[in-house]
Amino acid sequence: TAIYVERSYNGDDYYQSLHRVRRFGTTHSPHVIILLSIDTKDKDGVSSTNPTIDHVIHKVLGFKRDNSIQITTGLVREVLGV
């Protein structure tokens, strides 16, 4: 089990840490827990509509992951002529 309390924009660091959790020889899938803040409140205690930094980083890392998959899948298809 891996619990991420906070992450950075650096996708390489995040994905490397995920690979360390999924070591060779492991027969089970590890549980990965990502903690995200719920929302922010202004000085009067009113919830803000702005996303928290946790949500921004989560979105950026997802975008990087999706782009990496599309690029590598496209390159493999190009090489295979599919």
Image (spheres, grey):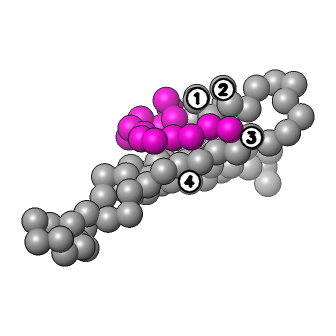
Q: Nearer the viewer, mark 4 or mark 1?
A: 1
Please state the extent of the stretch shown in magenta in the rendering: 1-14
Mark 2 lies on a secondary structure that is helix
Q: Determine whether label 1 and label 3 are within 8 Å by CB.
A: no
Badge 4 element: helix
Q: How far apart are the alpha carbons under marks 1 and 3?
A: 15 Å
Residue 16's disc number: 1
CB atoms at circles 4 and 3 under 8 Å apart? no
| Marks 4 & 1, CB-CB < 8 Å contact | no
Q: Are marks 1 and 2 in contact (CB under 8 Å)?
A: yes
Label 4: which residue? 66
28 versus 44 height, above or below: above
Q: Earlier in the sequence, mark 3 or mark 2?
A: 2
Rounded to the nearest angstrom, the CA distance separating label 4 from label 1 is 16 Å
Q: Is residue 33 magenta?
A: no
Tell me if 17 is positioned left or right of 27 in this view: left
Decide: marks 3, 2 in contact (CB < 8 A)?
A: no
Q: Nearer the viewer, residue 82 or 17?
A: 17
Label 1: few (<14), some (14–19) or many (≥20) C-alpha neighbours in 10 Å: few
Where is residue 41? Give x, y as percent.
Answer: 21, 66
- Residue on which the image places disc 2: 20
Mark whose residue sits in front, 3 or 2: 3
- Is tag 4's residue or tag 1's residue first in the polypeptide sequence? 1
Tag shown at residue 36: none
Of labels 1 and 2, the one closer to you:
2
- Determine the secondary structure under disc 3: loop
In the picture as drawn, the residue positioned furthest to the front comes out as 45
Q: Position of residue 79 (x, y in %)?
A: 74, 41
First in sequence: mark 2 or mark 4?
Answer: 2
Tell me the residue at 10%/65% (across/down). Answer: 43
